Amino acid sequence: MKALGPIPQGYALIDGELAIAGRRASDLVAEAGQTPLFIYSSQHLRRRVQTLRAAMPDRLALHYAVKANSFGPLLSLMGELVDGFDIASGGELALASAAGIDAQRISFAGPGKTDTELTAAITAGVTLNLESEGEAERAITIADRLGHVPRLAVRVNPDFDLKGSGMKMGGGAKPFGVDVDRVPALARRIIGSGAEWRGFHIFAGSQSLDSDAICDTQAETLRLAARLAMESGVPLPHCNLGGGFGIPYFPGDEPIDLGLIGARLAEQFAALPDLLKETRFSIELGRYLVGEAGVYLTRIVDRKISHGEIYLIVDGGLHHQLAASGNFGTVVRRNYPVAIASRFDVQAEEEASVVGCLCTPLDRLADKAGFPRADVGDLVAVFCAGAYGPSASPAQFLGHGPARELLV
């Protein structure tokens, strides 16, 4: 029997069922009128941001990475909770705008920005984190044509990466950002063009559970920012330190030590060189803010036995939860936290696999794990579903379409 990942704190039991934000899973499904269904808890979101702010230095601004979850009501709520937003496409800019987010709070990173996207961002007043000299020249040319003063920053490809990162975004040859040795010249070119100079975006990696590695990377990032500012010969107005804070998904995973990270960063801020005394700093987090606030609910439509193995077949699957199926960058498939929501208080009685409704053996949400006996009609809950569910999964695969989403 294979272990399941750890269920996040903050979920309760009502009448034997999983409760989310004080409401039974079955009641939430009834309100939505269907499964599969993503539920996002506003209580979890508020508590996570409050805890994070309490641990981090007051000087540090908090940005939300829209790529993690771009659901409109969730974006609107995050607009009340965070200081800024980081987007990665013109589509995300449109979603943020529709959610009432002021463009002055938005920065736009990502390679391959089209002229259409650059035009929309410059017109709106979004900060562009430039990924190359070529992109910088296009942005300056477009701004001149529009008669706008663009807000421009440089995304730096750091000469280090985040140790223990699930996805390394820096160090060596990368499609992301400008190599360190070319940054000063580009910064001077931007300032010389008459653009509003917005500083650096330095992102080394994501999804790390190694607190010491996160602290070390933040220290390296601050040293790099100081060196590049000195070599550029201009003050540094803002520096996005990236993110990298991971959440526990799999058996044996432990949460990061937020207190340690905050304390170490406060020490680093206290020792900043004069060159960075007036610099504004931010961190950019997606899954750490929203991942544990989401639950994916899907209903068992068939129970079958094949060669002695039990399969619980649900009406959802990898088309909504690609990461939980093990097909989103995972080398060795391990089980997410999964439970029978309608029998949340019952101990494991049998070994079963939870599989989706798609015609592919990749569609597996839990592999040979321990569950209470579950039957047709029971609800299955996949936790840690608040990040990279709808925003990263192939909802149209085999024509099944997207799941419903609710913020409660």
Image (cartoon, rainbow, N blue to C red):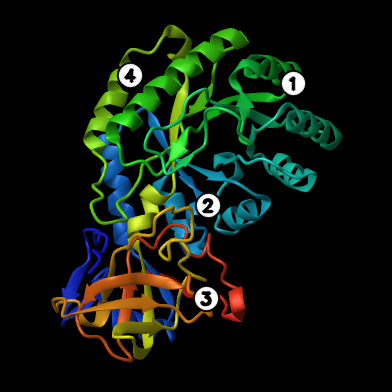
Q: For label 3, count other residues whose C-alpha is less than 10 Å away and answer few (under 14), some (14-19) or many (20+).
A: few
Q: Position of residue 291 (x, y in %)?
A: 37, 56
First in sequence: mark 3 vs mark 2: 2
Q: For label 2, count other residues whose C-alpha is less than 10 Å away and answer few (under 14), some (14-19) or many (20+).
A: some
Judge depth for marks 3 and 1 and give the one in front: 3
Horizontal relation, residue 259 to residue 271: left or right: left
Decide: is 102 above or below 377: above
- Res 374 → quadrant: bottom left
Tell me if I can see residue 204 in this picture. Answer: yes
Real-space CA distance between mark 3 and mark 1, rounded to the nearest whole angstrom: 54 Å
First in sequence: mark 4 vs mark 2: 2
Name which residue type carries label 1: Gly
Residue at x 61% of width, y 11% of height? 232
The dot on residue 67 is 2
The dot on residue 360 is 3
Name which residue type carries label 2: Lys
Judge depth for marks 1 and 4 and give the one in front: 4
Real-space CA distance between mark 4 and mark 2, rounded to the nearest whole angstrom: 29 Å
Judge depth for marks 3 and 4 and give the one in front: 3
Residue at x 55% of width, y 55% of height? 100
First in sequence: mark 1 vs mark 4: 1
* Residue picked out by circle 1: 194
First in sequence: mark 2 vs mark 1: 2
Tell me if I can see residue 57 in this picture. Answer: no
